[in-house]
């Protein structure tokens, strides 16, 4: 798949191995977003840190083979490459045990990372990487640039504080939540209502952010874009596992919106992508344009 306008994207944050019962798969939400954006025709670089170990070398080789720029993935001599133990329930929903400290908690910016971010169209970042002060301070520096900033909220207890989440929202041009995340955060910020659109308007006003999306699992997603709401009710799929489905959804939505697709078209396309990823094992299955067109026709 390719776009008329080729986006330059930077993804900042965790790169790691998702450890399932019988295998390991490369992962980390920012990396999953980056890989999907690359498959959609974007130029993408990853800013992160791996350990000087076999897992780290394998990540760099894999990421390079998949077409991402790796000059801004540094190597730590002191901390191991990240590992996450993934447990799937009977419905394919995942829970995560995230090892700490990991190399991606200690991201230090090199000159290549700074240059890539300054030259990029869009910077993708999440909340998990801010659990450690070292990586959080590096992100704060990158958030001072004029790049379009996309905040992917990823609440993994106990790895977040509401104060930092609020700062990250206020730094963003676009924020993506799932339905549980926006209700939890808005409630703590003294907005007790459960209507998703009201919560999206509240966050938009609080953080002065013009683009907000809320995913609703099998029920699709809501998008607030330039003051207008758009909705998709989801596509039927037999779930293999939910790992990475939201990441591919976000990658597809942001790529489509920033290459001037109409908002409803962008949302429908992203929901189809998310459903297809949920219907396949692992975070980064190959999905073709014809796969997406077929599931959209079936509805």
Image (cartoon, grey):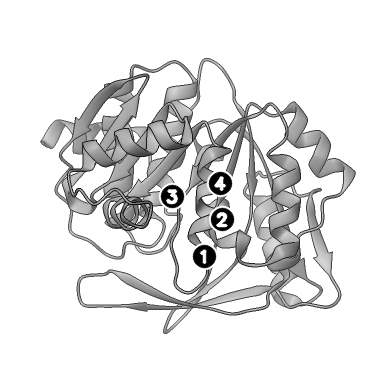
Q: Earlier in the sequence, mark 3 or mark 1?
A: 1
Q: Which residue is mark 4?
A: 168
Kindly check if marks 2 and 4 are in contact, taking CB atoms under 8 A apart as contact. Answer: yes
Residue nearest the viewer, comparing 6 with 154: 154
Q: Earlier in the sequence, mark 4 or mark 1?
A: 1
Mark 4 → mark 1, Cα distance in angstroms: 11 Å
Per the rendering, the mark at residue 264 is none
Residue 18, placed above or below residue 48: below
Residue 79, placed above or below residue 44: below
Kindly check if marks 4 and 1 are in contact, taking CB atoms under 8 A apart as contact. Answer: no
Per the rendering, the mark at residue 164 is 2
Residue 59 picture location, percent across and down = 67, 64
Instruction: Judge left or right: residue 255 versus residue 195.
Output: right
Crowding around mark 1 (Cα neighbors within 10 Å: few <14, some 14 to 19, many 20+) is some
Residue 288 in view here = yes
Q: Which residue is mark 1?
A: 160
Mark 2 → mark 4, Cα distance in angstroms: 6 Å
Residue 103 picture location, percent across and down = 73, 70
Instruction: Judge left or right: residue 45 versus residue 275.
Output: right
Q: Quadrant of residue 51?
A: bottom right
Residue 294 picture location, percent across and down = 21, 35
């Amino acid at each position: 798949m390719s776009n008329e306008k080729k986006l330059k994207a930077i993804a900042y944050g965790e790169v790691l191995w998702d450890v399932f019962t019988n295998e390991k798969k490369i992962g980390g939400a920012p990396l999953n977003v980056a890989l999907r954006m690359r498959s959609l025709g974007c130029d993408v670089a990853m800013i992160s840190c791996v350990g000087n170990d076999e897992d780290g070398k394998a990540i760099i080789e894999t990421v390079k083979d998949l077409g991402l720029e790796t000059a801004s993935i540094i190597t730590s001599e002191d901390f191991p490459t990240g590992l996450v133990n993934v447990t799937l329930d009977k419905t394919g929903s995942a829970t995560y045990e995230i090892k700490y400290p990991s190399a991606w908690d200690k991201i230090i910016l090199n000159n290549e990372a700074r240059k890539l971010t300054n030259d990029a169209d869009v910077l993708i970042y999440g909340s998990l990487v801010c659990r450690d002060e070292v990586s959080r301070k590096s992100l704060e520096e990158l958030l001072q640039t004029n790049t379009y900033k996309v905040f992917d909220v990823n609440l993994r207890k106990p790895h977040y504080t509401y104060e930092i989440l609020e700062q990250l929202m206020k730094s963003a041009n676009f924020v993506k939540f799932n339905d549980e995340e926006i209700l939890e955060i808005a409630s703590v910020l003294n907005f007790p209502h459960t209507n998703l659109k009201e919560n999206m308007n509240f966050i938009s006003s609080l953080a002065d952010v013009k683009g907000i999306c809320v995913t609703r699992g099998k029920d699709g997603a809501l998008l607030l874009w330039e003051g207008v709401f758009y909705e998709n009710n989801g596509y039927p799929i037999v779930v293999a596992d939910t790992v990475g489905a939201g990441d591919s959804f976000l990658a597809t939505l942001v790529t489509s919106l920033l290459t001037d697709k109409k908002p409803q078209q962008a949302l429908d396309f992203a929901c189809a992508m998310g459903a297809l990823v949920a219907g396949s094992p692992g975070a980064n299955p190959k999905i073709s344009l014809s796969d997406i067109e077929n599931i959209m026709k079936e509805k």
